[in-house]
């Protein structure tokens, strides 16, 4: 049976997982979209494959920054436990992702786009797509090191772009390095993607699969009530 909006054990509408190679990748790529998921009652988990040890500044903790950012987004946080710079793309990583997708009953997955100059981003994308073999919706986000990124899906993030920038500021070590977390550029990118997507502010995605659910909110909530009643 094709069941949608099954509802999470915690009572969310849809279960969403977003995977990033390093602390800050998920916020950069789809932070404002995740905030929209949270705002409508979805259950969102982010999986960060490494602790970002190679991008560390003296006296600062990237795991703590990631925890703060996750709290600002209102999402659950899990760690992959791999070494920064050496994320595998085979069975070891796929098993870790499989476990998170199963534990969260994920229906929607966000991950890196495959074409990226950073080896950890490429490996995370490859492993994610393999692990997501049964998921109906898989969208891939851009990072500052993406290449040949050609989005087809645009999410209107007018309501959440400011909160996204706030969450990114939690990654203070990366803001201070003046590297990928360049807040002015990230804001300009969202404005440009909005221009492309015919809205004002957007995050943009490449698509592996998109099961477009046209249920009305009342249908979705009725289906959820039935599913929850059946599982009691
Ligand atoms: Zn990264």
Image (spheres, rainbow, N blue to C red):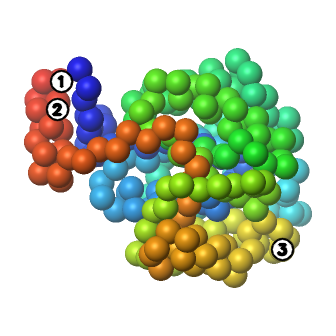
Residue of label 2: 228
Residues under numbered marks 2 and 1 in contact, where contact means CB atoms less than 8 Å apart: yes
Residue of label 1: 231
Please give the label number shown on residue 178.
3
Residue 26 image-quadrant placement: bottom right
Residue shown at 85%/35% (left/top)?
86
- Give the vertical position of 174 relative to 43 (above or below): below
Residue shown at 18%/53% (left/top)?
217
Task: Estimate the spatial distance between the alpha carbons at disc 2 and disc 3, rounded to whole Å.
Answer: 47 Å
- Give the vertical position of 102 relative to 66 (above or below): above
Disc 1 is placed on an element classified as helix
Residue shown at 34%/44% (left/top)?
212
Residues under numbered marks 3 and 1 in contact, where contact means CB atoms less than 8 Å apart: no
Disc 3 is placed on an element classified as loop
Residue 55 image-quadrant placement: bottom right
| Horizontal and vertical percent position of residue 177 | 85, 70
- Label 2 neighbourhood size at 10 Å, few (<14), some (14-19), many (20+)? some
Task: Estimate the spatial distance between the alpha carbons at disc 2 and disc 1, rounded to whole Å.
Answer: 5 Å
| Horizontal and vertical percent position of residue 146 | 75, 55
Disc 2 is placed on an element classified as helix
- Label 3 neighbourhood size at 10 Å, few (<14), some (14-19), many (20+)? few
């Amino acid at each position: 049976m094709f069941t949608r909006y099954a509802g999470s054990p915690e009572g969310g509408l849809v279960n969403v997982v977003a995977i990033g190679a390093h602390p800050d990748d998920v916020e950069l790529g789809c932070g404002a979209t995740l905030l929209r998921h949270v705002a409508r009652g979805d259950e969102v988990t982010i999986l960060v494959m490494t602790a970002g040890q190679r991008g560390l500044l003296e006296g600062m903790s990237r795991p703590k920054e990631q925890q703060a950012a996750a709290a600002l987004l209102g999402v659950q946080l899990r760690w992959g436990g791999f070494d920064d710079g050496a994320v595998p793309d085979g069975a070891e990583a796929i098993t870790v992702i499989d476990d998170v997708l199963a534990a969260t009953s994920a229906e929607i997955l966000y991950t890196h786009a495959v074409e990226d100059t950073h080896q950890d981003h490429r490996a995370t994308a490859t492993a994610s797509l393999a692990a997501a073999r049964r998921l109906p919706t898989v969208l891939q986000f851009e990072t500052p090191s993406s290449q040949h990124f050609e989005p087809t899906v645009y999410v209107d993030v007018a309501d959440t772009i400011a909160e996204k920038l706030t969450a990114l500021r939690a990654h203070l070590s990366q803001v201070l390095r003046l590297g990928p977390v360049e807040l002015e550029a990230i804001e300009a990118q969202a404005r440009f993607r909005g221009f492309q997507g015919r809205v004002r502010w957007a995050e943009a995605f490449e698509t592996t699969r998109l099961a477009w659910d046209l249920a009305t909110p009342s249908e979705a909530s009725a289906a959820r009530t039935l599913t929850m009643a059946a599982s009691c």
